[in-house]
Amino acid sequence: MNMIIKCPTCGANNRLKEDSSNAKPLCGKCKSPLIVQQTTGPIYLTDITFDNFIRKSNKPVLVDFWANWCVPCRLLAPVLETFAQSQHSIIVAKIDTDKNPLIASKFQVFSIPTMILFVEGKEVKRITGALPLQALENQLKPWISIN
Ligand SMILES: [Zn+2]
């Protein structure tokens, strides 16, 4: 499978082979080093790491606001795991709202699970409630590049 990496310097999209032995890929246009984020599963964010992560990410970030006691959140968890591994356009992150109440409050997340898609640190899409993989992919289609 190929993945598209956006150059942090010039913004050009670079197509890389996922299993590339080239550990330090360079941008085809300006030769700057590319940052390859391995998206093997959801990334766990906290109140402290959240802002920096979503603002600096060169890909859209889907953040799942969840908690341990929430049954639909547990149903959604494997869907998000599969989604994270099945595509490279969107980074999947999770934030435990019990341990990290500040971010949930900042974005006025009143019911969980809520998923918010951030592009360059800004909310562009909000999905409330658990849903199957196909439905999730449909909702996020505009941000998923086929490659
Ligand atoms: Zn470049």
Image (cartoon, grey):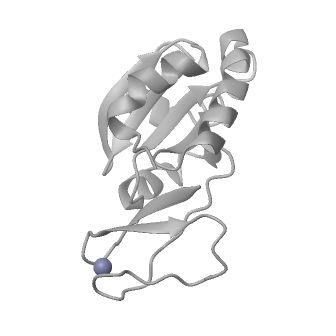
- Residue at point 41%, 53% (across, down): 59
Q: Position of residue 73 (x, y in %)?
A: 66, 18
Which one is in front, 45 or 135?
Answer: 135
Quarter of the image for residue 82 reads top right
- Residue at point 73%, 19% (across, down): 74
Q: Would you say residue 109 is visible in this rendering?
A: no
Q: Is residue 13 above or below residue 63?
A: below
Counting labels gives 0
- Residue at point 36%, 55% (across, down): 55
Q: Is residue 108 left or right of residue 96?
A: left
Q: Is residue 102 left or right of residue 82?
A: left
Q: Quadrant of ligand 1?
A: bottom left
Which one is in front, 69 or 91?
Answer: 91
Q: Is residue 40 above or below residue 108?
A: below
Q: Quadrant of the N terminus?
A: bottom right
Q: Position of residue 48 (x, y in %)?
A: 53, 52
Q: Is residue 137 left or right of residue 13?
A: right
Q: Position of residue 126 (x, y in %)?
A: 38, 23
- Residue at point 50%, 36% (across, down): 63
Q: Would you say residue 83 is visible in this rendering?
A: yes
Q: Position of residue 135 (x, y in %)?
A: 50, 16
Quarter of the image for residue 52 reads bottom left
